[in-house]
Every structure is written in C-alpha cells, then in structure tokens.
Image (cartoon, helix red, strand yellow):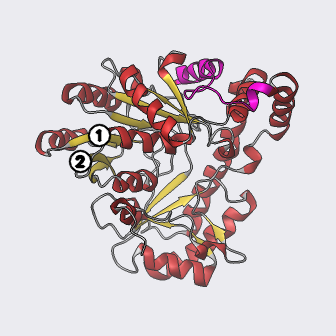
Amino acid sequence: MLQFSECTQYFVPSAIRNKLFDQPDMISFSAGKPEESSFPFAMIQSSIERVLANDKVRAFQYSDTEGFSSFRAQICALASHTKTKASPDDITLTSGSQQGIYFSAKIFLNPGDVVLCENPSYVGALNVFHSFQAKCVGIPLDADGMNLQALEKALCEIPDVKMIYTIPDFQNPTGVTMSVEKRKKLAELAARYEIPVVEDNPYGELRYNGEAYPSIKSFDEKGFVIYLGTFSKIFCPGLRLGYVIAREDIRAKIILAKQMSDLQCSSFNELIAEEFLQQVDWNDHIARVREIYGARNDLMDRCMKEYFPASVHYQKPQGGFFYWLDLPQKGPTSDELLLCAAKEEKVAFLSGTSFYANQDQPHHIRLSFSNVPYERIEEGLKRLGKLLNRYYA
C-alpha cells in the first residue's frame, strides 16, 4: 500500500477549478483570469520572430536560475513605477508570483509556525501555507488595508510568528487597497519585530483612477520586505513569469529553492518578454489594459446597482479584478447560494468561505469581472440579481 507523506493531507484543490462551472450556458464570475483581448498577440508574434532570428541559442539553452540579467534590468525599470528601488542583482525570476509565495513559505516556515495575513486573503496563498503545516492567523481588514493595531497585538502576543503576508493593491478577494501611511508603518513593524513581510502585488498596475501608490518595499530600510511581482495579469499568464525582489540572504535561499524545484524559468519565455518590453511603450500597453478592465468595472457597478437588492453591500474597487459582496445574515450561506445559482440560473462565482484563514464567514461572495465577455456581464448579473432578490430583498 502506498504511503504518502504527511504534508499531502494538507493539499487542497483550487476552488476555481470546479466542474460545476463547466455547464453549458454558464456565465462564470469565478476565475480571476485575464481577458484574452488584453493579450498583445501581434507584438508577441513579432517578439517570437525576433528571438528565433537573433537569439535562438540562448532561447533553447539552460540559463542562470535567477534569469537573464538584461531582463532583470527591465524589471527594475517597471518596479520603479511604485518607487521600488532594485538592481538586477536584487531580482530572481519565478514561475509567476504563485511560485514566489511557495518559495517564501519554503524558506521560512516549519510545521506549527504562524503566518499573519489579511482576513480574508488569497486562497492560493493560504493553501500554500497550510501545506507547510503552518497556522494562518487572520488580521481584520479595514477600508484602507490591514488593521495594524491588531497586527502589532498579534506580533506581541502570538509566539512562532514567522511571516506576514499581504496584498496591498486591490486585494484578492476584497479589492481593498492599503493606504500609504499603513504601508510605511508595516515596513517599520517588520523591521522592529524582524519578521519578513511578503508583499504580493499582481494587481498594482491595474489602477483605473489616480496614481500608483508606493510599494511597502519602497519603505523597507532593513530588507525585511519580500516583493512579489508578476506579468500574468498585465501581459500573459501562460508565459509563467514572475519575480522576487529581496535582500541578498533571502534571495540566495530562493535561488537554491528554485534550483531544486525547476532549475530556472523558460529561457524562451524570458526572451520573448524581453523583446516585447524593448518594442512596446509600456505606459501605452498598460493604458490599453486598464481601459479594457476599467470598462468592465464600470459596467459591473452599474448593473449591480440596478439588479441587486439594497441589502447586498459592496464597494466599487479602484483597480484589480474583484468585487466582494457582503450578504445579509438571513437566508442561505454563500456555499448554498453558489449551488443554487449554478443549477437554477447558470451563473457562478466563488463563495467567500475559502478565503478566510481562521474564521467561519459564510455570507460573502467574490465576483471576478476580468474574464467574463463584456456582452455577457449584464446578463450574468441579471441572473444573479434574480436569485439575490428572492432571498434578500
């Protein structure tokens, strides 16, 4: 009889990969996938052709684990948009920011250690931390980000805290953005208590109004902030390109972890992205992507105001992919509502229950507008509104 390792009992399937969502005529607000029209296919094809014509040997050969230095230099320029100062030597490439989360957990967490995170938080990160048999302790989330009084109280009172995890920009799942004041304070707390902060920032470029906030990393004077970036939401997720910005000793451990995991990211994919960044005006590219999602965001807000009962509360996000709905305590739980919506109205979303670290919160749902065809958004929200009005009007 096979004997699997103890850690496998903590493996949890993705809530997004639910066969229930695959029914014909289903309108799904579940996955936070990018919209395919945001992919610059013509420029990508041109980049591939240039790589094959001019750099085919490097494209198909092994490369350094941390990635090509020329590509890392381009990433430094992109990171400067959030006032994050970095040199190519501060950066290691990863297979998306998900691998950055995994490696951060791998180099810091032992069984029984504690991770402090926003409550609710990104389920993909929670699952990683649980797989290392760590305990996730949720910190309340205010309208301007993690409640830092509660965070400091936890740092003082809870033993074995080894990591703080946060998504400061357009947080998944709530869409909340951390204030600049809290970013600075969080960097100070990390240095004072000597606890690493993993700053996960997949949505920072997707601000539909105003200027980008400086990163938590930009206030990091002692090197306790690990910044995770990715090209998945703003370029192409299929290339699986993300990166870690961290001080030398942390980065050295992450490089070793990557060598043991997959040796390196795809040389070909790195060079495709490098060529793309050389050809394109990044500000123009981001402006086009923001326009695509900003239009969907506006439509979501208009339709929910029209079709949803007033007892269902939400805040319109200023960026990112997600709406977080607060349902009345009466009526079905979010899990029950999901089953009903999928079977009766052919509309899907994610129940909020899986996003909580250590509390049972059965009356929230997450709606993602990023990958729903624009022309189907109103119909999908009309279907969901019909169900919500049945129970909550």
- Asked whether, in this view, residue 240 is left or right of residue 171, the answer is right
The quarter holding residue 367 reads bottom right
Image point (61%, 62%), residue name: 303
Image point (75%, 42%), residue name: 39
Residue farthest to the front, as pictured: 1
> Residue 229: percent from the left, percent from the top?
52, 34
Q: Are marks 1 and 2 in contact (CB under 8 Å)?
A: yes
Q: Which mark is residue 285?
A: none
Q: Is residue 191 visible?
A: yes
Residue 109, above or below 255: below
Residue 81, above or below 338: above
Q: Which residue is mark 2?
A: 113
Front-lying residue, 327 or 190 = 190
Q: Which mark is residue 163?
A: 1
Q: Crowdedness of circle 2 by 10 Å Cα count: few (<14), some, many (20+)?
A: some
Residue 3 part of the magenta-drawn span: no
Q: Which element carries disc 2, helix, strand or loop? A: loop
The quarter holding residue 347 reads bottom right
Residue type indicated by callout 1: Met
> Residue 91: percent from the left, percent from the top?
51, 24
The CA span between labels 1 and 2 is 9 Å
- The rendered magenta stretch, by its main secondary structure, is classed as helix
Q: Is residue 318 visible?
A: no
Residue type indicated by callout 2: Asp
Mark 1 or 2: in front is: 2
- Asked whether, in this view, residue 191 is left or right of residue 127, the answer is left
Residue 72 part of the magenta-drawn span: yes
Please give the range of residues in magenta: 57-81
> Residue 210: percent from the left, percent from the top?
54, 31
> Residue 290: percent from the left, percent from the top?
66, 39
The quarter holding residue 333 reads bottom left
